[in-house]
């Protein structure tokens, strides 16, 4: 579950890097070449102070030895090094970034695949805006992190070692003073870094909340306008927007503290070089040429430290992105194939609930306790009852959208958990009240029912669903764009397209979850006729509030919080004069 206020990481940096490093495995050759190029650029940069040292000392000690030929030879050497540096830098900047993008793509693919395996419980408790933020924005920073992280630390390590060796050779005591400052600088900056990482985490969480708020408001914009609550939505958005501003403000405070700290330590190092170096030169403990080289190497060392510290912001962004990715990957997959699962084939449609008990994992409210029910192949069962009685839950347990807590659901004599999830769900067709159409064409939405269906099969499914006529009347026929969630179509049209989708799937088991309750009378009549055609020869379970649509069912079940309390045909239940009779009489009075 997403916790808005959670800003403390539950993963250490080592754990996150341990989860991230395997993504380098496919690209290890690129990493090796990239680090080789990084080493070349570093060596090219480190040679310049040695050239300046040689020229300066030669000019001071023996000016006659400093000929034009010597200067040109040094210049030619430096030119060659700069050409090598340019070529190596191009490889790092291009191929390195492409590698980072590939790793980001791999991680996003893995995250999306994992999200597809998560149960409804996860989606019931996690905002879509948060999920979108995790697999898009949060992984953007991983590209830069994956490319620059090994480079920056590799370069910094080379420069630190080479600088220490060369500077110690020039003047050991001055080097000791300089390097004594470095650990203090690292400790102070690490403390600020930890706070910066927490701020970045809060920022990522709030971005997700902001995305969720925008998505919720825009998708429900008709409701907002109908209740004239535009100002209320603006106020809620402004509250989230201001919270995001305050979090970013805090982030920039730590970034500013970070930058100020590094500049202060830079100044301290230069102060030591100027003061101590000047005194050592006066006492002839260091030559002018050596001091020039010393200053250049110290400048290189300081620039390296500053670059690593500045990289820390990018490092923390990347680590936050990795952490948010890992949180997705660590979300439990509750519904999975058992080790001995087999394909679900040649389904007849006999379904049995045997002592089934179930409570939703997130709130532990018990829905069923020791529920028993037998549905015969080809039988048309209708389920009625008060809201909250578990009608939809019962139907969702059959395709294993949730697992039962106790007991078992048996299909054709075998526990549904012994079938592979994909093959089980392929044998079940569902038509729900809340129809979901994907953004695309009418044709694409019907063809979603079965891969590789021909155009003729799609059109035949539409014919059988009673949808072909109105589809042909649309502006672009089957190529008509339906809009996001099918907003360009009426409720009846969307429902018939969803029925056509199930016709194309052609499953032996059919679940109709209040498929006509939200329609007007004319649309209900057309859809009901399509559903009757769809139900022929299939085991059919219908959930309905409108009792007129289930009168011809083979058996009607009345499901309440106490379980199945009544069972029989329409006529039998009316004669019993129980709950069903009360529902039926109430419905007639409301007509």
Image (cartoon, rainbow, N blue to C red):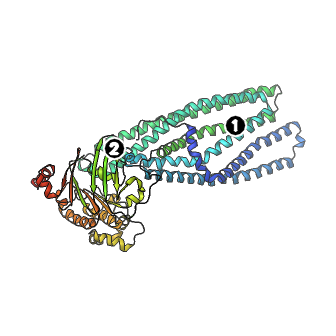
Label 1: which residue? 301
Q: What element carries label 1?
A: helix
| The one of 333 and 84 positioned closer to us in this rendering | 333
Q: Is residue 117 left or right of residue 49?
A: left
Q: Can residue 313 be seen?
A: no
Residue visible at 41% across and 54% down? 418
Asked if residue 46 lies left or right of residue 226, the reply is right
Residue closest to the far front: 413
The mark total stands at 2
Image quarter for residue 53?
Answer: top right
Q: Where is residue 289 in the image (x, y as percent from the top left)?
A: 81, 36
Residue located farthest toward the bottom when viewing the structure as drawn: 456
Q: Quadrant of residue 130?
A: top left
Residue 62 horizontal side relative to residue 548, left or right: right
* Real-space Cα separation, disc 2 to disc 1, in angstroms: 59 Å
Residue drawn at point x = 83 percent, y = 40 percent: 54
36 with respect to 577 (left or right): right
Q: What residue appears at the point 45 percent right and 36 percent down from the top-left corner? A: 247
Task: Point out the tag, 2 or 1, that comes first from the N-terminus.
Answer: 1
Disc 2 is placed on an element classified as: loop
Q: How crowded is mark 1: few (under 14 residues within 10 Å), some or many (20 or more)?
A: many
Please say if the residues under marks 2 and 1 sit with CB atoms less than 8 Å apart. no
Q: Indicate the quadrant containing the C terminus: top left, top right, bottom left or bottom right.
A: bottom left
> What residue is shown with label 2?
360
Q: Which residue is drawn at 54% across and 43% down?
A: 318
Q: Can the viewer see residue 410 in this picture? A: yes
Up/down of 340 relative to 295, above or below: below
Residue 278 percent coordinates (x, y): 76, 28
Residue 572 position in % (x across, y down)? 14, 56
């Amino acid at each position: 579950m997403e916790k808005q206020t959670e800003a403390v990481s539950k993963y250490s940096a080592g754990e996150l890097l341990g989860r991230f490093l395997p993504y380098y495995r496919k690209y290890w050759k690129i990493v090796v070449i990239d680090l080789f190029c990084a080493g070349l650029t570093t060596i090219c940069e480190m040679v310049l102070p040695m050239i300046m040292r040689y020229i300066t000392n030669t000019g001071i000690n023996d000016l006659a030895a400093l000929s034009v030929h010597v200067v040109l030879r040094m210049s030619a050497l430096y030119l060659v090094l700069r050409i090598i540096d340019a070529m190596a830098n191009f490889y790092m900047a291009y191929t390195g970034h492409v590698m980072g993008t590939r790793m980001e793509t791999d991680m996003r693919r893995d995250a999306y695949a994992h999200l597809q395996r998560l149960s409804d419980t996860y989606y019931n408790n996690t905002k879509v805006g948060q999920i979108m933020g995790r697999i898009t924005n949060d992984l953007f920073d991983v590209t830069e992190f994956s490319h620059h992280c090994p480079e920056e630390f590799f370069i910094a390590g080379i420069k630190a070692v080479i600088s220490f060796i060369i500077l110690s050779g020039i003047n050991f005591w001055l080097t000791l003073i300089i390097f004594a400052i470095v650990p203090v600088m690292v400790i102070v900056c690490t403390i600020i870094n930890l706070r910066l990482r927490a701020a970045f985490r809060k920022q990522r969480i709030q971005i997700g909340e902001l995305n969720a708020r925008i998505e919720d408001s825009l998708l429900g914009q008709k409701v907002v306008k109908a209740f004239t609550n535009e100002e209320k939505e603006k106020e809620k958005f402004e509250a989230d927007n201001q919270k995001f501003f305050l979090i970013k403000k805090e982030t920039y405070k730590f970034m500013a503290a970070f930058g100020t700290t590094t500049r202060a330590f830079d100044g301290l190092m230069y102060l030591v070089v100027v003061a101590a170096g000047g005194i050592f030169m006066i006492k002839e403990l260091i030559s002018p040429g050596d001091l020039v080289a010393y200053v250049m190497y110290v400048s290189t060392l300081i620039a390296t430290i500053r670059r690593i510290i500045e990289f820390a912001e990018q490092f923390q962004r990347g680590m936050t992105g990795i952490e948010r990715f890992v949180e997705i990957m660590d979300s439990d997959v509750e519904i999975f194939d058992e080790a001995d699962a087999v394909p679900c084939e040649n389904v007849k449609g006999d379904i049995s609930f045997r002592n089934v008990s179930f409570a939703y994992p997130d709130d532990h409210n018990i829905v069923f306790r020791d529920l028993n029910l037998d549905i015969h192949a080809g039988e048309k069962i209708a389920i009625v009852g008060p809201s909250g009685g578990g009608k939809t839950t019962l139907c969702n347990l059959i395709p294993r959208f949730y697992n039962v807590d106790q007991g078992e659901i048996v299909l054709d004599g075998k526990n549904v958990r012994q079938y592979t999830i994909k093959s089980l769900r392929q044998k079940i067709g569902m038509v729900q009240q809340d129809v979901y159409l994907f953004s695309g064409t009418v044709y694409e939405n019907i063809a979603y029912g079965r891969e590789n269906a021909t155009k003729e099969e799609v059109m035949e499914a539409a014919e059988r669903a009673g949808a072909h006529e109105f589809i042909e009347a649309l502006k672009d026929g089957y190529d008509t764009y339906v809009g996001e969630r099918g907003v360009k179509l009426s409720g009846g049209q969307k429902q018939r397209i969803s029925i056509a989708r199930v016709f194309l799937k052609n499953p032996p088991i059919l679940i109709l979850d209040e498929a006509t309750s939200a329609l007007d009378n004319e649309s209900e009549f057309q859809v009901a006729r399509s559903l009757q055609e769809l139900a022929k020869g299939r085991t059919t379970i219908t959930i309905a509030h409108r009792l007129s649509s289930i009168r011809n069912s083979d058996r009607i079940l009345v499901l309440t919080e106490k379980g199945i309390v009544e069972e029989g045909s329409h006529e039998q239940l009316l004669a019993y004069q129980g709950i069903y009779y009360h529902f039926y009489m109430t419905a007639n009075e409301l007509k």
